[in-house]
Every structure is written in structure tokens, then in C-alpha cells.
Amino acid sequence: LFVEPDLAAGGNLTLGKDQSLYLAAVLRKGVGDEVVLFNGRDGAWLCRLTGDSKKSVTLEIIEQIAPQTPKSDFWYGFAPLKSERLDYVVQKAVEMGVGTIQPVMTQFTQVHRLKPDRLSANAVEAAEQCEVLNVPEIAAEISLDRLLADWPETHGTRTLLFADEGEASSSPVAALERLAGQSIGLLIGPEGGFSDAEREKLHAQPFVIPISLGPRILRADTAAVAAMALIQAIIGD
Ligand code: SAM
């Protein structure tokens, strides 16, 4: 379970209403039961319930059972999709080991108002589910132009894999094999794809490598998961 406070041996914690209800009513934990907590900084900690009211569960922090894992270097940029699909890509990005989730506004992006709290809650839930001790950062949205202009300064030598259905012959496997051990970014477009002007701009960047994910046009959420799986299979940890 993800919590905000610092975790250290001998400490005590009181959970808020939602998490208390979740532990007491959904997971059916009672006084004396153990639960593992993490906060994204201090590793995983074994804790014991000392009070189990549905409104406020209290816990005693017993011992660290896993050290903090370092933040993943894998960067994922995507044009925001409509709500359920957005929830899905955030969840899958966490499961696939992304370290930074970056909404990127492109010409054909249809969703302009994001709900950062909802995105973060999804990321936390996915991290809890797949036992990732580092909840990926959800960066504030940025325009594609700004992203490309700032890339060398903000990303250094990171390569940006630009997934585009127009790249019928650019197999990602060979490109990824050459990138083993290096910092990787993945860019996935919106429902309407990238515009020709955006494609031209992306192709002109020395840090961009265009990749194809096969001859069919995949949904943006499918393309994201397919590309992440390939990246993890070929160069992931
Ligand atoms: N209209 C569908 C949707 O609503 O999701 C398909 C959108 S497709 C244009 C969205 C993005 O997925 C593209 O901009 C590209 O990044 C990626 N994509 C889809 N098919 C691909 C393929 N065969 N190769 C590489 N990237 C692909």
C-alpha cells in the first residue's frame, strides 16, 4: 500500500478514511495483521495493524523488507487520449517499467484538459498492483514543439523512439539492439496520428529514431503497450 509519510522502524502511522476502509473492509485486515507499505523513497516496510476502525486504521512500522529501487530511466511520451484509454495507458506504462510519463500535446490531440490527480491515483494503484516501489513521475503536459526544442538540454543523449504507422519498413528490433544500455524515450501519437509537419520535424531531429510496429494501424493504447513490451524485451531490465 502506498503512503505519503516517511517510513522508519518503530514509527506509527494513521491512515486516512479511504485507505482505512480499503484495508479493513476490502482486504479484511484486523488488529495484529501485517501489511506492506511503501512511499517511493524508503523501500518496502512490514507493518502491523494496531487499530482497525473503518475510518482510521493505525499501524506500527516493524521492519524494512526491501530496499528502495532506483527510478527507471525509461521515458514515455504520449498524446493524451480520452478518459478510460488514458487510465489504461498510465496503468500499462507503470506495469511496463516506465520511470516518467509525459503527456505531449500534438496537432491532432483531442484531449486538452488532464486531471493530474486522477493520473497520479492510477499510477499509484498500478504501482501497488505490480509491486513497483517507485511510482513513476507524471510530468506536466508539454507541446511537441517545446519537447523537441528542449530535448538536448533536458534529456542529454537520450534517444527518442518515434512510433509511426507511416514507417512501414523501420523494424524496431535492430534499432533497439543498437541502443542496449542507453537511455530511451518512446513517443506515441494521438487517435488521429501525427500531422505531416510533425513527422517532418521529428525526422529532422538527430536524437529521433522512427520505428514501425507492423503494417497495421494500431490503436494508440495498443501501440504503446506493444512498443513498451519490445523495448523491455530487447533492452529492459
Ligand atoms: N485511430 C486509432 C486510435 O484511436 O487509437 C489509431 C491511432 S494511431 C494513428 C495512434 C498512434 O499509435 C500513432 O500516432 C503511432 O504513434 C502509434 N501507431 C499505431 N500503429 C502503429 C504502427 N503500425 N507502427 C508504429 N506506430 C504505430
Image: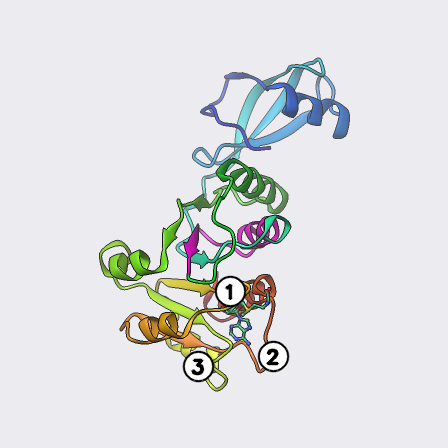
Horizontal and vertical percent position of residue 183: 35, 62
Callout 2: SS: loop
Q: Magenta span has 98?
A: yes
Rendered residue at 39%/44% (across/down): 140
Where does the image place residue 46, in percent across and percent down from the top left? 58, 29
Residue situated in front as seen by the camera: 45 or 29:
29
Q: Which residue is mark 1?
A: 232
Determine the secondary structure under disc 1.
Answer: helix
Task: Find out whether the residues at labels 1 and 3 contact each other: C-beta distance under 8 Å.
Answer: no
Q: Position of residue 137 (x, y in %)?
A: 43, 44
**Residue at mark 3 to residue at mark 2: CA–CA distance:** 20 Å
Among numbered discs 3 and 2, the one appearing first in the sequence:
3
User: Which residue is at 48% across, 86% downward?
Assistant: 169
Q: Which residue is mark 3?
A: 174
Q: Is residue 46 above or below residue 84?
A: above
In the drawing, what numbered circle is on residue 216?
A: 2
Which of pointers 3 and 2 indicates the residue nearer the eye? 2
Assess disc 3: are there few (<14), some (14-19) or many (≥20) residues with their C-alpha within 10 Å of its C-alpha: few
Which picture quadrant has residue 26? top right
**Total marks in image:** 3
> Which image quadrant: the N terminus?
top right
Q: Quadrant of ligand 1?
A: bottom right
Residue farthest bottom in this picture: 169
Residue 189 vertical placement versus 89 (above, below): below
Q: Are marks 1 and 2 in contact (CB under 8 Å)?
A: no
The amino acid type, in three-letter code, at marker 1 is: Gln
Mark 3 and mark 2 in contact? Answer it, CB < 8 Å. no
In the image, the segment drawn in magenta is 86-106
Could you say which disc has been placed on residue 106 in the image?
Answer: none
Distance from mark 2 CB to nearest ligand 1 atom below 8 Å: yes
